[in-house]
Image (tube, rainbow, N blue to C red):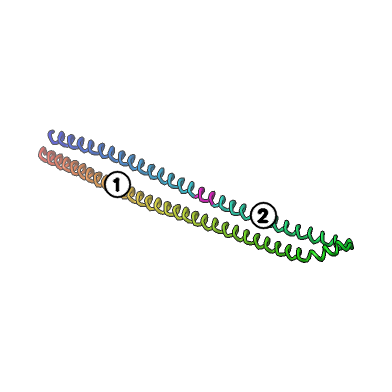
Amino acid sequence: MEDDEDVIVRLAMLEDRVSALEESVLGSMEENRKKFLALSDAADTEKESIAIMKESVEKNLHKLEGAVTLDIHMERNARIGAQAQLEQMVNDKVLSLSLEAQSGSACAQEMFQGEDMNQYALKGMIVENLQAEREKWKSAEEEILKKIEVSSEEIQKMIKIESKIREESTRDMILMLAKFKETIGSDIAREKQERERVTESILRILEEANMRSSGVAQHRN
């Protein structure tokens, strides 16, 4: 009778251990689930941050392209306008001289002959103006190229920063996932060992109870 009570007590203790083990397993599962959700949130946050940075880089690139295109367009229009003015001025002057020469008056002929020096001066002025316009356009082109170079360097820096952030985020995420996997593996191994110990204890108690029951039956016989 005492042996039966001892077996019952030991089985009750094992049941308590099994219940505690189940609670521990459930607690570990919940904790691991929370860790996994936290890692998922962190990964989503990193993806969102990278997407925002990528969008910012693309916007800056579009702004740069628009600014450069506008500068080139404005400078080209200014150069075309200046050349058109010079051509119009030359045409007007030549037309005026031709009309005066064709009038046939001695005064006009003298004026036309006397305009030779003025024509040379006019040509010199035109050449100087054209040269000035070329220098101006060349300077504007150099300035635009500098802007493009500086902006390209800034974009390259932003791309490098984005790539570095992405690499660091990916590396951190891999380390966190590896650590998380290692923790889960350790928890599962520990829980498996505990279950095996409990099972062995239950089998041993049942075996002892059977042996005692067999001994009592033989003694009675």
Q: Which residues are magenta?
A: 54-60
Residue 99 is drawn in which quadrant?
A: bottom right
Label 2 crowd bin: few (<14), some (14–19), many (20+), radius 10 Å:
some
Q: Would you place residue 107 above or below residue 209 in this image?
A: below
Q: Give amino acid for label 1.
A: Ile
Task: Name above or below for residue 154 compared with residue 16.
Answer: below
Residue in view at x 80 percent, y 64 percent: 114
Q: Position of residue 46 (x, y in %)?
A: 43, 47
Amino acid type for the residue under numbered disc 2: Ala
Q: Residue at x 46, y 48 (%)?
A: 50
Percent position of residue 131, x then y? 66, 63
Q: Residues within 10 Å of mark 1 (few under 14, many from 20)?
A: some
Tell me the quadrant of the picture where the C terminus can be found: top left
Between the C-alphas of marks 2 and 1, the distance is: 77 Å
Q: Which mark is residue 188?
A: 1
Q: Is residue 32 above or below residue 125?
A: above
Residue drawn at 27 percent across, 39 percent down: 24
With 79 as the anchor, is 27 left or right in this view? Answer: left
